[in-house]
Image (spheres, rainbow, N blue to C red):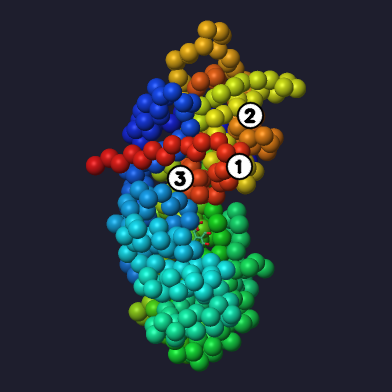
């Protein structure tokens, strides 16, 4: 994948760049995440409008658990998808309306904590987990609302990471479904609510995603008939993608059109749950870092940043060059010439002691100077959350939240 320099525009960029310019007047080099809640709301509202009736929108908080993001989101979604007791604690603090709990390694303490928190749905990932959940429910004197997370043999989706439709640690293998349903019936502490079929990450093909939802509904309908069960929900998970390196993004209106068939075939009384992470928050976050040094080694230019992959690991993890904008800063405090690169290609690298600390490679810039700020858009999802913050013990970035009334 290639990267690029962007010249961002629009009201959100005005707000973000103004906040960063203010940071640049401080004593320390700029290093910050900026979250713009106006941008977040625009995206959430667009998704809500696109989803037909009988759909419920949950936010998969693993994408970004900043308290301000969670509190804002809590007012606009049906609930949060969580994957640990830590996430449950954060979700409750933010006023989460409902919780659905996924993850392949839930401990007894986590299941207990989730049930005490009034869990809406436990997405169960194995027969062993099913038995443990029943035991814990019986001990607490509550019925455990379960959705069986099934790893189907077919019906996967394109995307960056496949979690079902192939061998992974996720879900109950489709061949074990009859056994799982039998167990669910036999254990009175369990209450079968539905199926959970999350299967990919960062799928950009809207038609394929709509087809996946339609196929999921058809599959669930077949299981209802075959096993004589009733369902309340079909949870199709998340996985809607963001075009980090340009090109056509996920076509939301097309997806909405394509959902018609799925809704038509939804068994009576059943609701469709979406657990979106990336697509809801990626656009609302920017990661910014000041250029600390500029150098050329072996004929290649490097801009060394106050920051790096320990704050924003996504491009290194997925091996692509993240797009960025240059925010020029005119102030220069040293009594000697300012290092700069004019009309050339540069690698943006971080402050870590490893050559793998790279955010963008070989990108052409018109001008880049020490003291300028580089700003990475689309950093609101799986940015800070997935990074190894304390490697080398540098100070963490500032976390700025812009909330327009
Ligand atoms: C069970 C589950 N639901 C939802 C999501 C959110 O996925 P995305 O951020 O791709 O929408 C994930 C992400 O890994 C997940 O594991």
**From the viewer's perspective, is the residue at label 1 or at label 3 nearer?**
1
Q: Residue at x 48, y 69 (%)?
A: 110
Contact? badges 1 and 3 (CB < 8 Å)? no
Residue behind label 1 places its C-beta within 8 angstroms of ligand 1: no
Mark 1 secondary-structure assignment: loop
Which image quadrant for residue 303?
Answer: top right
> Which residue bears the numbered disc 2?
347
- Residue 334 place in picture, x, y as percent: 52, 11
CA–CA distance in space, label 3 to label 2: 22 Å
Q: Which residue reaches farthest right?
A: 298
Q: How far, Cα to Cα, is label 1 from label 3?
A: 21 Å
Direction front: furthest residue: 393
What residue is pinned by disc 3?
380
Image disc number at residue 391? 1
Relative side of 42 to 325, left or right: left
Element class at badge 2:
strand
Which quarter of the image is occupied by the C terminus? top left
x and y percentages locating residue 347 in the rendered image: 63, 29
- Mark 2: give few (<14), some (14-19) or many (20+) Cα within 10 Å: some
Q: Quadrant of the N terminus?
A: top right
**Who comes first in sequence, dot 1 or dot 3?**
3
């Amino acid at each position: 994948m290639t990267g690029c320099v962007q010249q961002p525009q629009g009201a959100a960029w005005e707000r973000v760049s103004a906040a960063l310019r203010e940071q640049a007047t401080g004593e320390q080099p700029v290093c910050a995440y900026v979250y713009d809640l106006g941008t977040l709301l625009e995206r959430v509202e667009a998704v809500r409008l696109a989803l037909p009736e009988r759909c419920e929108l949950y936010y998969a908080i693993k994408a970004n658990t900043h308290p301000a993001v969670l509190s804002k989101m809590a007012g606009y979604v049906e609930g949060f998808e969580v994957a640990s007791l830590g996430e449950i604690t954060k979700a409750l603090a933010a006023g989460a309306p409902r919780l659905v709990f996924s993850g392949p390694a839930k401990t007894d303490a986590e299941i207990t904590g989730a049930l005490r928190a009034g869990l809406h749905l436990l997405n169960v990932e194995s027969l062993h987990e099913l038995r443990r959940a029943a035991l814990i429910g019986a001990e607490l004197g509550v019925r455990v609302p379960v959705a069986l997370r099934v790893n189907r043999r077919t019906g996967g989706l394109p995307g960056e990471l496949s979690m079902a439709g192939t061998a992974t640690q996720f879900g109950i293998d489709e061949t074990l479904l009859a056994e799982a349903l039998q167990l669910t019936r036999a254990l009175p502490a369990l209450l079968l609510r539905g199926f959970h079929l999350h299967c990919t990450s960062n799928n950009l093909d809207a038609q394929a995603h709509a087809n996946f939802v339609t196929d999921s509904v058809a599959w669930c309908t077949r299981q209802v008939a075959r096993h004589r069960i009733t369902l309340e929900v079909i949870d199709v998970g998340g996985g809607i993608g963001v075009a980090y390196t340009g090109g056509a993004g996920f076509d939301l209106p097309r997806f909405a059109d394509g959902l018609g068939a799925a809704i038509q075939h939804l068994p009576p009384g059943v609701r469709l749950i979406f657990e979106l992470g990336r697509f809801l928050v990626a656009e609302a976050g920017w990661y910014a870092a000041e250029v600390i040094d500029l150098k050329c080694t072996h004929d290649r230019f490097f801009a060394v940043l106050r920051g790096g992959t320990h704050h924003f690991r996504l491009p290194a993890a997925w091996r692509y060059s993240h797009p960025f904008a240059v925010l020029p800063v005119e102030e220069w405090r040293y009594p000697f010439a300012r290092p700069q690169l004019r009309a050339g290609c540069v690698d943006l690298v971080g402050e870590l002691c490893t050559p793998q600390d790279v955010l963008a490679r070989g990108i052409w810039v018109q001008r880049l100077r020490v003291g300028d700020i580089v700003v990475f858009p689309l950093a609101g999802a799986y940015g800070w959350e997935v990074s190894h913050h304390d490697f080398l013990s540098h100070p963490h970035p500032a976390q700025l939240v812009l909330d327009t009334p």
